[in-house]
Image (cartoon, grey):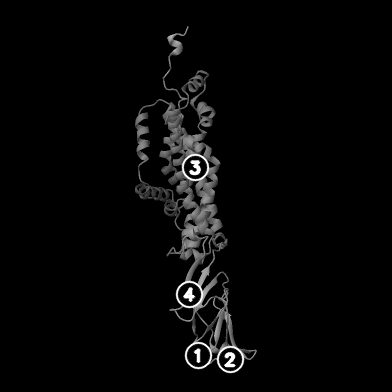
């Protein structure tokens, strides 16, 4: 006998229904597409910078990097040799040469004797000349101008031609940047500035973050709010007062020149502390409370808990801020110029590249190659710590 329960159909939605799976699949698809779009947006300019840094500097000056794999065509004009260069050969008077000179990275598509007909003949064909005889121009630019009678013209005639320039890649741009005078020194200066300016704020912020997260003292909430408020203070607004205060302290202690590495370390520490304290405090506040209580029951002091438990558990947040601070200090030019000046012996890499560009900034080959040289070190740092990056950014956002 069949009961009502046996014949009843359970119509409650389950996670195995096709509609639910479809909704989940659409959500995942949109997430993956969004991530792919972000990857493309970040990769596209980097790829363009790399391609530009490897291109010939003459091609880089006249065309964009997206044309690097195509042959460019343009109209050009060259002056042929005068009659005094002619020689007699096989009963004819001959003038030879190459319209490109020593440049062999071009190909002639057509040539002519006037700008009205620059494509009157194809390479290898003979074209009559108004000054007598005929000229044969090959694709590589070499020409033979021959006549049965001696040439008597005195003014060098012009030859119009359509030139095709194939893409050319070279490492000359990198050689020019890396072999420039003072680049190696500026590279070391950047490390001298960046490494301490990354370590010092991490150490100071770690102690402050633990105190704000787990220690009880008056005005703790006000201090946290003050730290959050300092995140929105523009660097440019605080730079001049900070420099003035630093110079006054340097004069008080009798220092003739206040532009030292110590000054820029302290400046970067001051600018980086608010973000460091905010990230680390949020992460430490999200650590399990039971671990802290059990450690206190066992008689551990705050310092022991901080060094033995909190610091190892907070490594993702520490690594996340390290990436931020390292990238900021390594790519910085403004703070370095203000606190170190343009001293050749203390010039950082970004400052050295600016000096290589000159006042007009039109040396694109130096700009592209130099920019890619500067991002190599930050890329190594980022990919070394990238697995901790997202975990550190999400610190404290969920419980």
**Mark 2, mark 1: which one is toward the viewer?**
2
- Answer with mark 4 or mark 2, whichever residue precedes in sequence: 4
Q: In the image, is residue 83 above or below residue 60?
A: below
Residue 207: x, y in percent? 46, 33
The residue sitting at the front extreme is 1
Q: From mark 2 to mark 1, how far is it between C-alphas?
A: 18 Å
Q: Nearer the viewer, residue 7 or 82?
A: 7
User: How many residues crowd mark 2 within 10 Å: few (<14), some (14–19), many (20+)?
Assistant: few
Residue 323 image label = 3
Q: Which residue is mark 4?
A: 76
Q: Which residue is mark 2?
A: 148
- Answer with mark 3 or mark 1, whichever residue precedes in sequence: 1
**Mark 3, mark 1: which one is toward the viewer?**
1
Residue 154 image label = 1
User: How many residues crowd mark 4 within 10 Å: few (<14), some (14–19), many (20+)?
Assistant: some
Which structural element holds mark 3? helix
**Mark 3, mark 2: which one is toward the viewer?**
2
Which structural element holds mark 4? strand
Q: From mark 4 to mark 2, how far is it between C-alphas?
A: 29 Å
Residue 294: x, y in percent? 50, 19
Which structural element holds mark 2? loop
- Answer with mark 3 or mark 4, whichever residue precedes in sequence: 4
Residue ID at (55%, 52%): 188
**Mark 3, mark 4: which one is toward the viewer?**
4
């Amino acid at each position: 006998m069949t009961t009502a329960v046996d014949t009843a159909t359970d119509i409650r939605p389950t996670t195995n229904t096709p509609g639910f799976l479809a909704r989940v699949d659409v959500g995942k698809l949109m997430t993956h597409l969004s991530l792919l779009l972000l990857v493309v947006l970040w990769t596209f300019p980097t790829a363009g910078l790399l391609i530009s840094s490897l291109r010939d500097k003459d091609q880089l000056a006249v065309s964009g990097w997206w044309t690097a794999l195509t042959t460019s065509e343009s109209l050009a004009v060259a002056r042929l040799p005068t009659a005094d260069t002619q020689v007699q050969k096989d009963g004819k008077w001959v003038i030879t040469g190459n319209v490109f000179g020593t440049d062999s990275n071009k190909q002639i598509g057509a040539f002519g004797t006037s700008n009205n007909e620059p494509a009157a003949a194809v390479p290898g064909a003979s074209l009559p000349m108004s000054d007598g005889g005929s000229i044969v121009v090959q694709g590589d630019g070499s020409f033979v101008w021959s006549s049965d009678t001696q040439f008597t013209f005195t003014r060098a005639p012009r030859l119009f031609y359509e030139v095709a320039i194939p893409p050319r890649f070279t490492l000359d741009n990198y050689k020019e940047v890396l072999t420039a005078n003072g680049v190696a020194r500026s590279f070391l200066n950047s490390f001298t500035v960046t490494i301490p300016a990354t370590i010092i704020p991490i150490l100071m912020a770690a102690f402050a973050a633990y105190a704000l997260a787990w220690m009880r003292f008056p005005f703790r909430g006000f201090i946290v709010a003050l730290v959050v408020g300092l995140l929105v203070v523009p660097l440019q607004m605080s730079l001049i007062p900070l420099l003035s205060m630093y110079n006054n302290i340097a004069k008080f202690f009798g220092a003739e020149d206040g532009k030292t590495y110590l000054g820029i370390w302290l400046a970067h520490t001051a600018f980086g502390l608010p973000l460091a304290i905010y990230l680390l405090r949020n992460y430490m506040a999200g650590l399990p409370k039971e671990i802290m209580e059990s450690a206190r029951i066992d008689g551990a002091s705050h310092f022991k808990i901080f060094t033995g438990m909190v610091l190892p558990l907070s490594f993702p947040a520490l690594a996340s801020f390290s990436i931020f601070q390292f990238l900021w200090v390594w790519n910085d030019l403004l703070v370095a110029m203000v606190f170190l000046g343009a001293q050749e012996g203390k010039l950082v890499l970004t400052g050295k590249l600016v000096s290589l560009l000159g006042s007009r900034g039109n040396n694109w080959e130096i700009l592209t190659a130099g920019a890619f040289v500067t991002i190599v070190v930050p890329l190594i740092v980022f990919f070394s710590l990238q697995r901790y990056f997202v975990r550190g950014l999400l610190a404290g956002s969920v419980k």
